[in-house]
Amino acid sequence: MTAGPALLDAPSRRRAGAGLGGIRSVGSETVDTAEVGRSDRLALMRSGELGSVHSWELVTAVDGPGTRLTVFLSGCPLRCLYCHNPDTLAMKDGEPVLAEDLLARVARYRGIFSATGGGVTLSGGEVLMQPAFAARVLRGAKELGVHTTLDTSGFLGANATDAMLHDTDLVLLDIKAGDEETYRRVTGRSLAPTLRFGRRLAERGVTVWVRFVLVPGLTDDPENVVAVARHAADIEAVRPGTVERVEVLPFHQMARDKWAELGRTYELDGTEPPTPEATEAVRDVFRAHGLTTY
Ligand code: SF4
């Protein structure tokens, strides 16, 4: 969902159709996800039995602790200028995947998860575009004893039910900018819902890793960085211990070709990644606000 460094076309990444679709039982019926009609498909999606999934991959030391099955759901209401997954933005472009098939895959990796302290991460796109599907997968994962993570911008945090948050061990919360004007420039949307969601997570005792993508000329203004750090510190202040870490992710250009392939205008074509020194200086700002950062 975010601009995670160097992961987005990892060799292990698999399109959702690879091993997750097909004919499966849903309740007492047998469903061919390729054949069901549009209205049936919508009903299954509303109930959360079926999701629209772009792809999945097994990763280590990113998207949460340990080795993780990261599942990229399709659909996102934001339009981040630096989006590294522009091919996940339309829900219609995803593959139909049954929650029970996804959970069967989660179950297969339980040994790796418990050996590494890992689990499943629902990402995207924006996972909270499909709250019923996410809720079903989170519940199923918890029943399997698997650690669960949501990777989200928080813009649709109101879609997350309390039950869903009860089944969520960790939220990777992107705070993409510190003020409304910059946030809107970066994403096309409003910052306020993300901050509301962050406070709610703290109130409910859900652990948060804040993520901030450092983009020269877009998000690196010192006032903006300080504002993001203040927001993260405010969430931490609601319940100390909530914000376990802040990840400052240096922008890179790995998605440039994807934008070109999709025929989209990519405004950051000439933007260079931040220097290691600039990235470290931003991390120092978060540290100065009492936060642990990497
Ligand atoms: S929130 Fe949506 S538009 Fe922004 S980086 Fe993530 S997937 Fe891309």
Image (cartoon, rainbow, N blue to C red):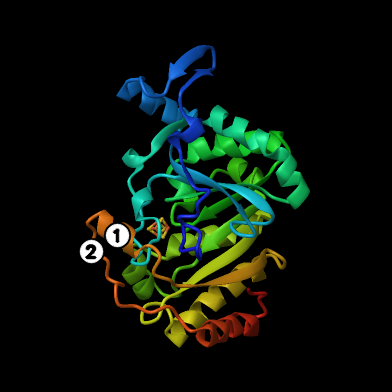
Q: Are marks 2 and 1 in contact (CB under 8 Å)?
A: yes
Task: Left or right? Give the position of 205 relative to 161.
Answer: right
Residue 74 percent across, percent down from the top left: 40, 44
Query: In which image quadrant can residue 16 be found?
Result: top left
Residue type pointed to by label 2? Thr
Can I make out residue 159 in this image? no
**Mark 2 and mark 1: Cα distance apart in space:** 7 Å
- Indicate whether 25 appears above or below 229: above
| Dot placed on the residue nearer the N-terminal end, 2 or 1 | 1
**Quadrant of the rendering where the C terminus is positioned:** bottom right
SS type, badge 2: loop
| Residue pictured at 48% horizontal, 61% vertical | 194
Query: In which image quadrant can residue 177 be found?
Result: bottom left
Can I make out residue 183 in this image? yes
Q: Nearer the viewer, residue 201 or 30?
A: 30
Q: Which residue is under mark 2?
A: 265
- Indicate whether 274 appears above or below 44: below
| Residue pictured at 29% horizontal, 72% vertical | 269
* Label 1 crowd bin: few (<14), some (14–19), many (20+), radius 10 Å: some
Q: Which residue is under mark 1?
A: 259
| Residue pictured at 46% horizontal, 43% vertical | 55
